[in-house]
Image (cartoon, rainbow, N blue to C red):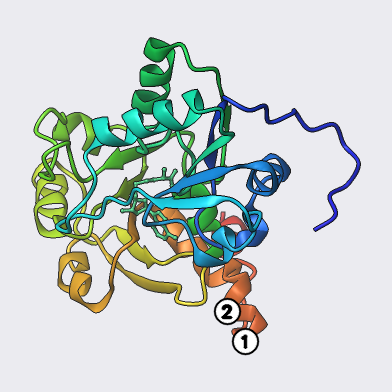
């Protein structure tokens, strides 16, 4: 693939680049990510990295799977960091490819600190995180001036795979009008119950967005109270979003419009309200 002639940093032997691959659609890769794929000697990738993205790696690159997926056998984090150090010390250009953005619920910080400890030089290439890119493909903006001035990203899993117990649920529920949960499917029942118990309205719009930006994308529009029952209808990876922004999908489902959905230019009913007022 020819890239525009913009200056790209040199990927030197002995370096590790921690690169975000975006939520799935290869078209959402950054130019730096494509450059890294074309230059790397070793690509260490996670479960969520799309095959079509790995196919962009140069043909001599060794591809090493370091996936972790809830409930399945996985490599341990220290093993992955040690492997990165070992490959870099052997003089390889090491591309550590992660789904979404490497610094958003992706342990990129942990891996980078292991490189610092080992004296291995590294670069971070941000990627489009699932909450932003994935919801955009579902026609749901994470902010809208008429709805919210803040958005909260939350993980539904902690390090042991349970719902994080250090979360202040009442504060979370009271905080931003829009909440986006990563890794939420498994514990959706507990998450939605806790939010409602902490004061969020069970009738609030909510959506589950699975395999966003891929051909398998699935979007279920529901309510906070009814969402947990829908969890069985989808497979991971999935996001869970709570808030009035979900209603904007009636106007902004641009992917749906490509297959004939008629979009509503006033999904929040604001022109009626303005006329009446
Ligand atoms: N670093 C990643 C997040 C890794 S955690 C990022 O910035 O996006 C993995 C979680 O991300 C999944 O459990 C899911 O909640 C979310 N996710 C990643 N890709 C997704 C996709 N294509 N569709 C929906 N959710 C996705």
Quadrant occupied by the N terminus: bottom right
68 sits to left or right of 177: left
Say which residue appears at 46% left-offset and 54% top-offset: 245
Q: Looking at the image, is 195 positioned above or below residue 119?
A: below
- Disc 1: residue Cβ within 8 A of ligand 1's nearest atom: no
Q: What number is the disc on residue 2?
A: none
Residue 137 relative to residue 230: left or right: right
Q: How many marks?
A: 2
Look at the numbered disc 2 and give the secondary structure of its residue. helix
Q: Percent from the top left, x then y, of residue 81? A: 34, 30
Residue 145 x/y as whole percent? 57, 42
The percent coordinates of residue 277 (x first, y second) are 56, 53
User: Taking 33 as reference, is 58 above or below it?
Assistant: below
The residue depicted at 50 percent of the width and 28 percent of the height is 90
Depth check, front residue: 171 or 266: 171
Disc 2 + disc 1, Cβ < 8 Å:
yes
Q: Foreground: 60 or 138?
A: 60
- In terms of depth relative to the viewer, which is nearer, 248 or 157? 157
Residue position for label 2? 256
Q: Quadrant of residue 52 in the image?
A: bottom right
Q: Which residue appears at 56% of the width and 42% of the height? A: 127
Question: What residue is rendered at 84% in x and 49% in y?
Answer: 3
Mark 2 sits near ligand 1, with its Cβ under 8 Å away: no
**Distance from label 2 to label 1 (Cα)?**
5 Å
Q: Most extreme residue toward the bottom, as rendered?
A: 260
Instruction: Name above or below for residue 25 compared with residue 220.
Output: above
Residue bearing mark 1: 259
**Mark 1, other Cα within 10 Å: few <14 / some 14–19 / many ≥20:** few
């Amino acid at each position: 693939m020819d890239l525009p002639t913009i200056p790209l940093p040199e990927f030197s032997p002995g370096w590790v680049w921690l690169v975000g691959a975006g939520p799935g659609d290869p078209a959402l890769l950054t130019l730096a990510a494509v450059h890294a794929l074309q230059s790397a000697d070793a690509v260490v990738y996670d479960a969520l990295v799309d095959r079509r993205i790995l196919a962009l790696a140069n043909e001599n690159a060794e591809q090493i799977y370091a996936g972790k997926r809830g409930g399945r056998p996985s490599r341990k984090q220290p093993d992955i960091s040690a492997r990165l150090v070992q490959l870099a010390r052997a003089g390889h250009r090491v591309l550590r490819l992660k789904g979404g953005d490497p610094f958003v619920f992706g342990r990129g910080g942990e891996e980078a600190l292991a490189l610092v400890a080992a004296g291995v030089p590294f670069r971070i290439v941000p990627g489009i995180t699932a909450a932003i890119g994935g919801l955009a493909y579902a026609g749901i903006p994470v902010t809208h001036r008429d709805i919210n001035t803040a958005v909260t990203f939350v993980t539904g899993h902690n390090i042991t795979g349970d719902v994080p117990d250090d979360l202040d649920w009442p504060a979370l529920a009271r905080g931003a009008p829009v909440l986006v949960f990563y890794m939420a499917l498994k514990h959706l029942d507990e998450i939605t119950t806790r939010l409602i118990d902490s004061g969020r309205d069970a009738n609030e719009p909510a959506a589950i967005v699975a395999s966003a930006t891929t051909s398998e994308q699935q979007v279920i529009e529901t309510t906070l109270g009814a969402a947990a029952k829908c969890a069985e209808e989808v497979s991971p990876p999935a996001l869970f979003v709570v808030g009035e922004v979900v209603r904007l999908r009636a106007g902004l489902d641009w992917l749906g419009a490509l297959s004939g959905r008629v979009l509503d230019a006033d999904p929040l009913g604001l022109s009626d309200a303005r006329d009446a007022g």
